[in-house]
Image: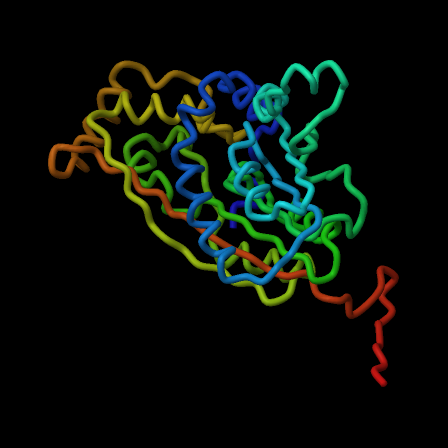
């Protein structure tokens, strides 16, 4: 699990990159749309009627309309740490709404996933599409999800696993450092859920392979998504012409049927907040049933 002292992500740099790439958010969003569709399929098998939903790491808000349509009686909250992306999630208001000051659509909050400005037990569903990939340690955010969920509430998330971008990692990493940062293993995420207090965690993994005509197309997609290396131990110096030529040559060795493959390991998980077995001071909770 990449929470050791030799791995950390620069959150300030990530915020700047996601903010700067906001104008291309829709262009670089194809992966999140595919992941969202697969997450929604899992909701079809879950009996839940939430009154409040938190979209954690909502970005430009593409999942919010789907959640509102699926649960029309629920109020939705979109939370993200990059304000320019969050601004894109604001619904367009008509003339009458602007004149009379009436707002529709989700509530939007710019905040850190590890310090949620929400009350304890204030939500029934936390939905998180590809947020955990951008945290050095997912446990604090998962604990916050547990805190803001009421008993019987559900956390549903998707993130990226260790095999993600393995072709790039093999071509770019060198003795000068990692140019593709690490991703968290599915089993470690399951351990985090249990440690945070969740019950009955369910985890599964799927692999998705994208193909590209050349290396430049890969890098364009990554930049549009704001998904470039933000590890604090990333190499700071330029690779140089020779280094880039060697990396491109290594990528070419992976070409199949005229295209460059790019592997994505998709990790899906959900878990429920069960009734506590002990209170915060450590005393056990004993329930009596008549």
111 or 123: nearer the viewer: 123
Q: Going 66% across and 38% down the picture, which residue do you hit?
A: 113
Q: Is residue 70 above or below residue 28?
A: below
When the figure is inspected, residue 146 is found, relative to residue 98, above or below; the finding is: below
Residue 5, percent across and down? 58, 41
| 248 over 271 or under it: above or below | above
Q: Residue 137, how many percent across, how many down?
A: 60, 44
Residue at 57% across, 22% down: 88
Residue 7 can be seen, yes or no = no
Is 133 on the left-hand or right-hand side of 104? left
Q: Position of residue 73 (x, y in %)?
A: 67, 47
> Is residue 79 shown left or right of residue 31?
right
Q: Residue placed farthest to the bottom in the image? A: 290
User: Which residue shows up at 41% across the image and 26% down it?
Assistant: 28
Residue 53: image quadrant is: top right
* Number of marks present in the image shown: 0
Asked whether residue 273 is in view, the answer is: yes
Closer-to-camera residue (77/279): 77
User: Horizontal and vertical percent for residue 74?
Assistant: 67, 46
Q: Determine the image quadrant of residue 224.
A: top left
Where does the C terminus fall, quadrant-wise? Answer: bottom right
Residue at the farthest left position: 257
């Amino acid at each position: 699990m990449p929470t050791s002292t030799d791995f950390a992500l620069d959150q300030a740099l990530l915020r700047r990159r996601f903010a700067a790439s906001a104008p291309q958010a829709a262009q670089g969003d194809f992966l999140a749309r595919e992941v969202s569709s697969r997450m929604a399929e899992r909701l079809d098998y879950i009996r839940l009627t939430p009154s409040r939903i938190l979209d954690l790491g909502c970005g430009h808000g593409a999942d919010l309309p789907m959640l509102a349509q699926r649960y029309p009686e629920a109020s939705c909250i979109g939370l993200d740490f990059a304000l320019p992306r969050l601004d894109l999630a604001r619904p367009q208001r008509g003339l009458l709404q602007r004149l009379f000051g009436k707002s529709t659509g989700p509530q939007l909050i710019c905040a850190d996933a590890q310090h949620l400005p929400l009350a304890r037990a204030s939500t029934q569903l936390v939905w998180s599409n590809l947020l955990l990939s951008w945290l050095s340690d997912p446990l604090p955010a998962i604990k916050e999800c547990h805190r803001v969920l009421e008993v019987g509430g559900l956390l549903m998330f998707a993130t990226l696993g260790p095999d993600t971008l393995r072709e790039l990692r093999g071509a770019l990493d060198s003795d000068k450092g990692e140019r593709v940062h690490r991703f968290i293993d599915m089993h470690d995420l399951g351990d985090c859920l249990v440690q945070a207090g969740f019950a009955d965690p369910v985890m599964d993994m799927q692999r998705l392979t994208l193909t590209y005509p050349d290396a430049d197309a890969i890098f364009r997609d990554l930049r549009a998504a704001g998904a470039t290396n933000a590890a604090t131990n990333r190499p700071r110096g330029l690779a140089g012409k020779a280094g880039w030529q060697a990396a491109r040559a290594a990528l070419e060795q992976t070409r199949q049927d005229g295209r460059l493959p790019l592997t994505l390991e998709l990790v899906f998980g959900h878990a429920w907040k069960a009734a506590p077995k002990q209170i915060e001071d450590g005393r056990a909770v004993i329930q009596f049933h008549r």
